[in-house]
Amino acid sequence: FVVVQKGDTLSAISLRVYGNANQYNKIFEANKPLLKDVNKIYPGQTLRIPE
């Protein structure tokens, strides 16, 4: 799990966790229906990070 920080994007989180910014869609898919738009994440949200 990752808690979204101010200024984070799914790409930035993906880069931190996987070492590849292009894996952001894995995080997006794992967090539906919490996330409805890949560009709308908010500080304080807890996102599940799939392996």
Image (tube, rainbow, N blue to C red):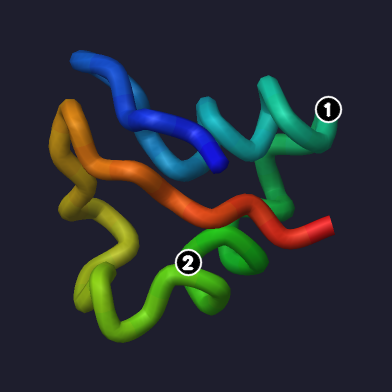
- Please identify the quadrant where the N terminus is shown: top right
Image-based side of 6 in relation to 33, left or right: left
Look at mark 1 in the image and give the residue it sits on: 19
Percent position of residue 19, x then y: 83, 27
Instruction: State the SS at label 1.
Output: loop
Where's residue 24, x and y in %?
Answer: 59, 53
Name which residue lies at 34% across and 24% down.
8
For this orientation, the residue located farthest to the top is 6
Q: Quadrant of residue 27?
A: bottom right
Residue type, numbered disc 1: Gly
Q: Amino acid at mark 2?
A: Phe
Q: Which mark is residue 28?
A: 2
* Whole-number angstrom distance, CA of label 1 to CA of label 2: 16 Å
Residue 34 position in % (x across, y down):
25, 72
The structure residue drawn at horizontal position 37% and vertical position 80%, both measured from the top left corner, is: 32
Which image quarter is the C terminus in? bottom right
**Disc on the earlier residue, 1 or 2:** 1
- How packed mark 1 is, by other alpha carbons closer than 10 Å (few <14, some 14-19, many 20 or more), is few
Say which of 40 and 49 sits in front: 49
Horizontal relation, residue 12 to residue 3: left or right: right
